[in-house]
Image: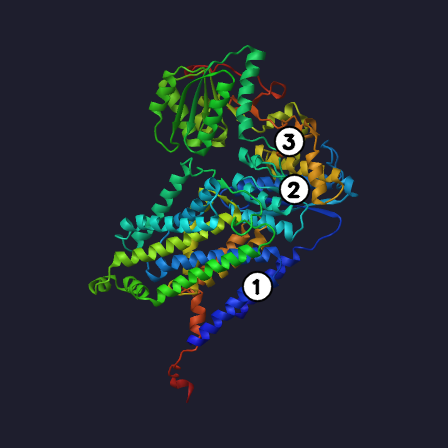
Amino acid sequence: MRRGSTALALGGLAAALAFPLLATRVTWQNTAILMLMTAQLGVAWNILGGYAGQVSLGHAAFFGAGAYVSTILSMKLGISPWLGMGAGAVCAAGLGVLVGTPCFRLKGHYFAMATIAVGEIVQAVVNGSDALGGAVGFTLPLGETGFWGFVFNRSKLPYYYIALGLLLLTVGVNWLVNRSHVGYYLRAIKDEPDAARSLGVSLTRYKMIAMMLSAGLTAMGGTLYAQKELFIDPNSMLSTSLSIKIALVAILGGAGTLWGPVLGAVVFTGIEELTRVAFGGTGRGTDLVVHGALLVLIAVYQPSGVMGLFTRRTPPAVPPPEPEAEFP
Amino acid sequence: MTSPLRTLALLAALLLSVRASAQEEIRIGVIYPLTGAAASTGIELKNAAQLAADLINGTDKSLGLPLAGAGGLPGLKGAKIKLIFVDHQGNPQVGASEAERLITEHKVAAIQGAYFSTVTTTASQVAERNGVPFLNADSSSPALTQRGFKWFFRTTPHDELFVQNAFEFLRDLKAKKGIQVKRIAIFAENTEFGTGAAKLQERYAKENGYEVVEKVLYPPKGTQLTSEVQKLKASRPDIVMQSSYLGDAILSMKTYKDLGFLPTALLANNAGFNDSEFLKTMGKDGNYVISREVWALDLGVKKPVIAKANALLQARHGVNFNGNSARAFTGVFALADAINRAGSTKPEAIQKALQETNIPGADLIMPWGGIQYDATGQNTKGAGIIVQVQDGKYATVWPFDLASKDVIWPMPAWDKR
């Protein structure tokens, strides 16, 4: 089992590394980048929403924090967006603590609702702040800058490999958390919070760790978005619909599993892009209907997420006892 | 897993088949919000753009615009224009992806779009990176032409020009009708739209020697404006320049009436005052409001080509042109004009032709002096118009040579309507 999944992971990595070299069409590369970026957000969300079971519908606030911090640092002070990415992650983790301190007192749906409110508040604040670009946002300067400037025009490959690297980093953090005592505590908090507390697990402390990691990694994705699209505004960076998309990708793929959100992102983005390419120009919304219908199908037939397809197919180590009727 | 894979492969094949291309057509990518909150506007824009392309490709010369009825572009041996529509869903990232797809997969000669200023920002960045001309017919954010782009051309006036127009209107009133305005109060909702407009109005008022006696910003979702209106009233302005959305526009008008506040004129900044619900709700109390517009149907009285074009759109889709669709229609003609003169679909040739564009106002269905771009790609001959509600309808009152009605100034008292 272990060896099998390691081989699968390595094979997947090799395929991911080779993909843009084989698929040289820009639109395919772009779709792949969008998949990687979405996957990274889903995996980052998963630390808090999947392992710790704290469903956040306000993650756009962290995504936006990363984008805004790196953008403002680079535009106003000329600091490389790479450093801005780190600064954004730290700020988002701090914001996560601010959000978590009151919100972690709430359970289940109430926590989710509180995070929606937080997301909306952040959007309203940025909308009204001239220093943060207001509703107009920021347009980043166009033009090839080399590695430190983090703007690449000539080829999609840098963005692809940066997105892939960021995804691997996020998956790596996820994996480490999963294996460490923090991961066990988080799962305990998710399944039996009262039992966990009675055993001396500090709920707030470990939820807070999950929040900080999740927020920080989400912010790094925000910086990548800003440097790729070179335009950020509250509506595209901080909207609740983005928060929902981040959560949806992870839940669709399989929340609480290592690769589920990645798979979810590939399926979600794939469906989104292909249906839009096929039907988007008609103006009849056919793509959204198809997209929505496929999501409903997955939700109905695969409620544990797309990941469930694979875990079920994997042959169990000990074959279950065969029903007697088959062997008359 | 095989069957989903097969479905994906099928969809991918579908994607490829779209690429089929013929030599004698000129492909232009058109990016509009065809789904989402602005879908109905997007469909109007799409229909207007398609009508323009069909007129150029067809042989009916009755409209009387150059290229209309040319049976394709004469400069390219009668090559037909093919518009490839894509949907940006109001999402800047989708807009960028779609622009890239138009350029790399469909090999479009140029792109037109995208109505939303935010999407125009990202989509035109992709065009700039790839060296493909991007024509924007309908986004009004001034920042778009302040980016130093070489491949970006905007036919429509932007927000600053609209404010400028209001002051030209005041100047013309003084010069031609002897109406003197001195004291201006500015009243605006406090989000981006209102604060931005208020800032520009204040600057232009001072530059033009007017006295700004009061400037009140209010939250647009409030339920009462009594204290704000009292402030306005106390400042005894000659005119109020107002930027409001629908709900607050109606609320403010009702409050004016209740408190008996009557400036000589109310100069509104489009938006709520030009929403079709505004007059329905206000009835005769909505009369005499003056507002800026980009286009009006009654322009057809002085400019017959507008009425003719409108009849064509009516025949096909059963709707009238409006400011948005008229600009989308004009955008296609402006692009076709440049490509025709370029005599080529090479991006550099089209870029050069766009830079040399000089379309006279008579050849447009817009109330403009023409189309001619400055170094930033902004059309310098664009202009807005000013309409006044008279007998429950928006009538063009400025520029005076296009006006269908005389401006009624000052506003009659609330109880004498």
Amino acid residing under circle 2: Pro
**Residue A36, relative to residue B327: is it above or below?**
below
Q: Same subunit under labels 1 and 3? A: no
Look at the image and tell me in which quarter the N terminus of chain A lies: bottom left
Q: Chain of mark 3?
A: B
**Residue under numbered circle 2:** B133
Q: Quadrant of residue B147?
A: top right
Colour convention of the picture: rainbow
Q: Earlier in the sequence, mark 2 or mark 3?
A: 2
**Residue under numbered circle 1:** A19
User: Is any atom of residue A88 visible in this view?
Assistant: yes
Query: Element at badge 1?
Result: helix
- Distance Cα–Cα, label 1 vs label 2: 31 Å
Circles 1 and 3, Cβ within 8 Å, touching? The answer is: no
Circles 2 and 3, Cβ within 8 Å, touching? The answer is: no
- The residue most toward the top is B178
User: Which one is in front, B177 or B185?
Assistant: B185
- In the image, residue A89 lies at what x, y percent? 40, 51
- Distance Cα–Cα, label 2 vs label 3: 15 Å
Name the disc covering residue B374, or none: 3
- The residue most toward the left is A198
